[in-house]
Image (cartoon, rainbow, N blue to C red):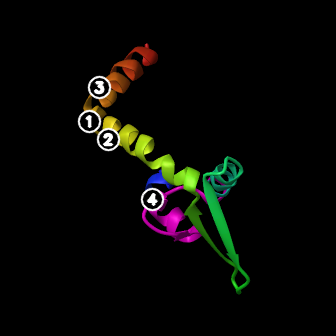
Amino acid sequence: MIISLAQYETLRFNELKRNLGISQPMLSLTLKELERDGLVNPTYHPTIPPKVEYELTPMGQSFREPVNALGQWTLGNLAKIDAAREIYDAVAKN
């Protein structure tokens, strides 16, 4: 989801957090992993409070198409996914 959100612009940490509805620790961990993988580049601004902006690296940009394809597949199969989950949950209860 971070790759999808960051594909069009540089985003600040709190913008990502607000748009994703994710906890701060989980977002921090995910961004560090994406940075380590070479997909995201942070820019630190020495302000009070500190400001960090994230943008996709060239490799991150190249990852957009597969991520978007996966997102489209998910949206196209959401009803099937929901139905499968309902069946699974019903069986798991028994």
Against 44, residue 84 (above or below) is: above
Where, quadrant-wise, is the C terminus in this rendering? Answer: top left
Counting residues from the N terminus, which is met first, the one under dot 3 or under dot 1?
A: 1
Where does label 4 land, which residue? 5
Q: Tag on residue 72? A: 2
x 29%, y 25%: residue = 83
Percent coordinates x, y for residue 64 in the rendering? 45, 49
Percent coordinates x, y for residue 31 in the rendering? 64, 55
Amino acid type of the residue that numbered disc 1 sits on in the rendered structure: Gly
Mark 1 in CB contact with mark 2 (< 8 angstroms) = yes
Counting residues from the N terminus, which is met first, the one under dot 2 or under dot 3?
A: 2
Disc nearest the viewer among 3 and 1: 1
Where does label 1 land, which residue? 76
Q: Residue furthest bottom?
A: 48
- Which region shows up in magenta? 5-26
Percent coordinates x, y for residue 50 in the rendering? 70, 79
Q: Secondary structure at mark 3?
A: helix
Against 8, residue 49 (above or below) is: below
Q: Secondary structure at mark 2?
A: helix
Q: Secondary structure at mark 1?
A: helix
Where does label 3 land, which residue? 83
Q: CA distance from mark 1 to mark 4?
A: 19 Å
